[in-house]
Image (spheres, helix red, strand yellow):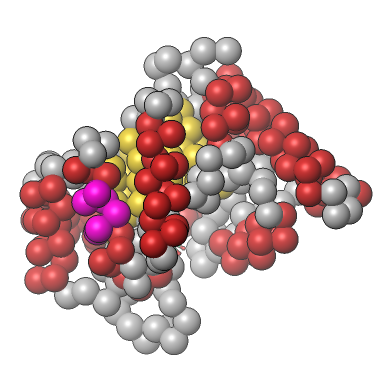
Amino acid sequence: MSNPDKRFSFEFFPPKTDVGKEKLEKLWTDLNTLNPAFFSVTYGAGGSTRDNTFSTVEKMQAQGLNVAPHLSFGGDDEKEMNTLLDRYKDLGVDRIVALRGDIPSGMGAARIVYANELVEFIRAHSGDHFHLEVAAYPEIHPESSSYTTDIAFLKKKLDAGANTAITQYFFNADSYFYFVEACKKAGIDKPIYPGIMPITNFTNLCRFSANCGAEIPQWLKRKVESLGDDKQAIQEFGQEMVIRLSQQLLDGGAPGIHFYTMNQLEPIQSIYKAVV
Ligand SMILES: Cc1cc2nc3c(=O)[nH]c(=O)nc-3n(C[C@H](O)[C@H](O)[C@H](O)COP(=O)(O)OP(=O)(O)OC[C@H]3O[C@@H](n4cnc5c(N)ncnc54)[C@H](O)[C@@H]3O)c2cc1C
């Protein structure tokens, strides 16, 4: 199968330790041989990885890679945000994943800047310099009051000047296809790239999915349960399942895939090679 016209990207989180940093550098060097459209580096909830995200992006840019920092207001004020945007621009960054961001516990009363407001802010400060990606939720954002409202808010951030959207991960291709159709009916005509999560540590995946509202289908859970403690069998099954999902998405017209790498080469590299 060949998908030369589709867009593929890889997401990392900024490592905390020196060992993690070394490992990540090796990882992006390996993944860069696959010629992705860009890499992205996440932003800790509330801006908690502000410096670490910046220094990771700085290092990648210096090596000639195309990198998009994730960005949210977190605890920053307008002046600090303007400075950060200018610093990214000076590094040569031309793409940003603009988010409200996760709200850290204990920050409930803090000012919330929705993604559409951040997009407006970036456009007002930096004009059209950055290509802006925003988040989309085929299974609907967990805090959203309804399916329709969440799509209306996605439209709002795209109308505010975002160029493209990347979805939260999901394991059911129909949720993506139905969502894209619903978005089109709501007047959204910008590309929506599915985000794909590998299945590696199933316990962690279940915990994380419960928080972010991604559904793990019952059959998938039961199948993994039936494999018991056989880690290799779970990984092989997870890989087969994610390859199948990725192929379904691309065959069904998805414009590309954004891979949540979890800072690991495998199984992402094998999944990528199987579908691209
Ligand atoms: C591709 C991708 C990358 C991500 N990267 C990170 C990351 O690096 N760091 C991180 O902390 N989190 C990240 N997240 C998670 C994301 O930050 C959370 O899902 C967060 O809760 C919502 O962010 P958002 O930008 O989608 O918010 P918004 O689009 O602002 O939406 C948040 C919620 O508020 C509602 N809403 C939207 N606009 C308005 C408005 N104007 N008024 C009232 N309600 C509104 C929406 O329906 C939704 O329920 C990522 C998610 C995705 C899909």
Q: In this rendering, does residue 85 appear at all?
A: yes
x, y percent for residue 69: 29, 52
Could you tell whether 94 is left or right of 98 in the image? left
Question: What residue appears at the point 51 percent right and 63 percent down from the top-left corner?
Answer: 144
* On-image quarter of the N terminus: top right
State how many labels appear: 0
Could you tell whether 179 is left or right of 256 in the image? right
x, y percent for residue 105: 47, 81
Front residue of this view, candidates 66 and 193? 66
Front residue of this view, candidates 101 and 90? 90
Q: In this rendering, does residue 176 appear at all?
A: no
Front residue of this view, candidates 204 and 211? 204
The quarter of the displayed image where residue 205 is located? bottom right
The stretch drawn in magenta includes residue 55: yes
Q: Main secondary structure of the magenta part?
A: helix
Front residue of this view, candidates 17 and 163? 17
Question: What residue appears at the point 59 percent right and 50 percent down from the top-left corner?
Answer: 139
The quarter of the displayed image where residue 66 is located? top left
x, y percent for residue 67: 28, 42
In the rendered view, would you say 255 is above or below 61? above
Q: Which residues are magenta?
A: 54-59
The stretch drawn in magenta includes residue 186: no
Q: Where on the image, by quarter, is ligand 1?
A: bottom left
Question: What residue appears at the point 53 percent right and 46 percent down from the top-left corner?
Answer: 264
